Image (cartoon, rainbow, N blue to C red):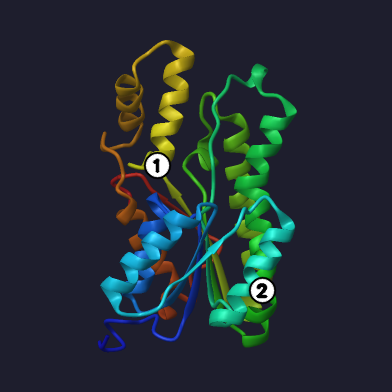
């Protein structure tokens, strides 16, 4: 597939996107592919990843690598990135999108719930960053974008463990950005508000069951939490991620960019 450098500014780049089989991750993978990057799709569900990789191949007439991986399993993370490097080379872009949310009143959160939320939403980010940074440092450049949440900025009811993990993602992002700046590597976080994804629907279902309300009513409440009173589309988040990955964004690092429909954006 042809195109100018301007049309395909990520030509020659290799992007890894975790949680890439659906929702925000799938939108990000498509956006980066459209900008010319070779994209490795990582996630837990093989069929979903392979089906989406097939869609992208048909759309862009290029190869896409699908790798199954659970970001909470250190051995699986190491093995997945080893396969990725062998197949496509060292990643020059990493988007840490894999995540999960479980809802519960704080006094009902047990240690296993707490650990699950930190493992998938924070420790997974840490482990994936470790996999790509040696090569990025050696080549004096790279882009890391961590998907946090507005819950990582201001918290939320019934999501204490999830919110703590997403706050941690922002702290990790800012600390890593300070360390990596001298190596030409940018590290940023993107913080979506309530987005039209299966994850939000699953969260609403949990809340509805707990409160004895309809899922539709809870979804409506979620929607009204966003400043414009509408859900964010996954593609809106993906466009912000793409912007942070562009070669001319070397001066933007350590930021937590909010995508919630607010007028300040």
- The residue identified by callout 2 is 82
Residue found at the far top of this picture: 212
Residue that badge 1 annotates: 193
Q: What is the quadrant of the N terminus in the image?
A: bottom left
Quarter of image, res 181: bottom right
Task: Name the residue located 43 percent from the left edge and 32 percent from the top edge.
Answer: 202
Q: Whole-percent x and y of residue 249?
A: 44, 75
Instruction: Determine whether 123 is above or below 28 in the image.
Output: above
- In the foreground, 116 or 4: 116
The image quadrant that residue 26 belongs to is bottom left
Whether residue 132 is visible to the viewer of this picture, yes or no, is no
The disc placed on residue 163 is: none
- Taking the spot 52% from the left edge, 24% from the top edge, the residue there is 157
**x, y (%) of residue 179?**
69, 69
> Who is closer to the viewer here, 81 or 128?
81
Compared to residue 225, the image places residue 263 above or below, namely: below
Instruction: Report if the CB atoms under discs 1 and 2 are less than 8 Å apart.
Output: no
Q: Residue at x 29, y 76 (%)?
A: 60
How far apart are the two marked residues, 1 and 2, measured between alpha carbons? 33 Å
**Side (left or right) of 257 relative to 195:** right
The one nearer the camera, 40 or 169, is: 40
| Local secondary structure at mark 2 | helix
Which of the two residues, 123 or 209, is positioned nearer the viewer here? Answer: 209
Residue 233 placement (x, y as % from top left): 30, 48
- First in sequence: mark 1 vs mark 2: 2
């Amino acid at each position: 597939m042809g195109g100018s450098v301007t049309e395909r500014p990520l030509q020659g780049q290799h992007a890894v996107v975790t949680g890439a089989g659906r929702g925000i991750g799938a939108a990000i993978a498509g956006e980066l592919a459209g900008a010319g990057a070779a994209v490795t799709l990582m996630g837990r569900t093989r069929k979903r990843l392979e089906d989406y990789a097939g869609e992208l191949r048909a759309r862009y007439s290029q190869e896409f690598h699908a790798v199954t991986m659970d970001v909470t399993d250190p051995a699986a993370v190491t093995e997945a990135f080893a396969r990725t490097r062998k197949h496509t080379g060292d990643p020059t872009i990493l988007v840490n999108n894999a995540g999960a949310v479980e809802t519960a009143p704080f006094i009902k959160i047990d240690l296993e719930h707490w650990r699950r939320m930190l493992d998938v939403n924070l420790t997974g980010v840490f482990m994936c960053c470790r996999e790509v940074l040696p090569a990025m440092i050696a080549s004096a450049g790279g882009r890391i974008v961590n998907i946090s949440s507005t819950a990582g900025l201001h918290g939320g009811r019934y999501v204490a463990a999830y919110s703590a993990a997403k706050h941690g993602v922002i702290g990790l992002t800012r600390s890593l950005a300070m360390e990596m700046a001298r190596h030409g590597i940018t590290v940023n976080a993107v913080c979506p508000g309530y987005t039209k994804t299966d994850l939000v629907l699953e969260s609403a279902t949990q809340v509805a069951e707990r409160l004895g309300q309809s899922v539709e009513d809870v979804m409506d409440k979620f929607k009204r939490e966003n400043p414009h009173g509408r859900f964010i589309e996954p593609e809106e988040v993906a466009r912000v991620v793409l912007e942070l990955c562009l070669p001319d964004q070397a001066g933007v690092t350590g930021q937590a960019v909010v995508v919630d429909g607010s007028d300040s954006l």
